Amino acid sequence: ADAARISQPAATQTVAMMAKEGLVEVAAGEADARQRVVALSAPGRALLPRLQHAWQATDHAAAGLDAETGLLAAVAATLAALDRQPFAQRIAAARQQDTPPTTPKRKIR
C-alpha cells in the first residue's frame, strides 16, 4: 500500500478483486503468517504488455495536459498551501470573520 501510495484498505480491496479475477495469487508470509505475499498469476502476467501500453499512453496524455495548463505546478502549490494551513482550518477561520468573503456568487446547477 505504501509503495503504491494508497491506503491499506484500498490495497486489500484491490488485491481481493484481482485474486477473484485470477490475476494474482495470495499466500501467507514465510516469517509472519499475518502478512500476505501477492504475486501475479500467469493470466496477470499476460496482461502486463497491454497495461504497460495503457500506462505509457496515460503518462503521455498527462504530460501534455501539464505542458498545456501547468496542472502539476498548480497542484503542488495547492498541496503546499494546504500543508501550511489545512482546508478545515481555512473554513473555520472564514466562518469566524465578521463579514463573509466577497466571492462572486454562482448559480448551483
Image (cartoon, helix red, strand yellow):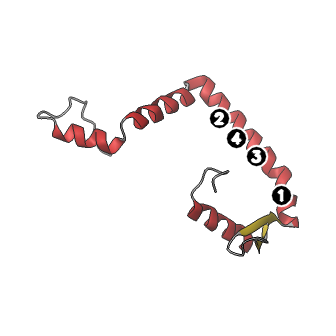
Residue 42 horizontal/vertical position (percent): 88, 66
Can you identify the residue that label 3 sits on? Answer: 54
Q: Which of 24 and 46 is in front in this view?
A: 24
The Cα–Cα distance between marks 2 and 4, rounded to whole angstroms, is 6 Å
Identify which amino acid the numbered label 4 is placed on: Thr
Reply above or below: 103 against 1. above
Per the model, the C-alpha gap separating discs 3 and 1 is 11 Å
Query: Residue placed farthest to the front in the image?
Result: 31
Q: Which quadrant of the figure contains the N terminus?
A: bottom right
Q: Which mark is residue 62?
A: 2
Q: Is mark 4 on a helix, strand or loop?
A: helix
Residue located 20% across and 29% down the image: 102
Q: Which of marks 4 and 1 is nearer the N terminus?
A: 1
Position in image of residue 21 (x %, y %): 74, 71
The amino acid type of the residue labelled 1 equals Leu
Answer whether labels 4 and 3 touch (C-beta < 8 Å): yes
Quadrant of the image occupied by residue 93: top left
Looking at the rendered structure, the secondary structure element under dot 1 is helix
Tag 3, which secondary structure?
helix
Q: Mark 4 points at which residue?
A: 58
User: For this view, does 25 lie left or right of residue 69?
Assistant: right
Dot 2 and dot 4 residues touching (CB under 8 Å): yes
* Distance in Å between CA atoms under marks 1 and 2: 22 Å
Q: Residues within 10 Å of mark 3 (few under 14, many from 20)?
A: few
Q: What's the distance in space between the residues labelled 3 and 2, CA to CA? A: 12 Å
Query: Any mark on residue 47, and which?
Result: 1
Q: Kindly indicate the quadrant of the structure image that contains residue 68.
A: top right
Task: Specify the amino acid type for callout 3.
Answer: Ala
- Which label sits on residue 81? none
Answer left or right for 25 relative to 74. Answer: right
Q: Is residue 97 left or right of residue 11?
A: left
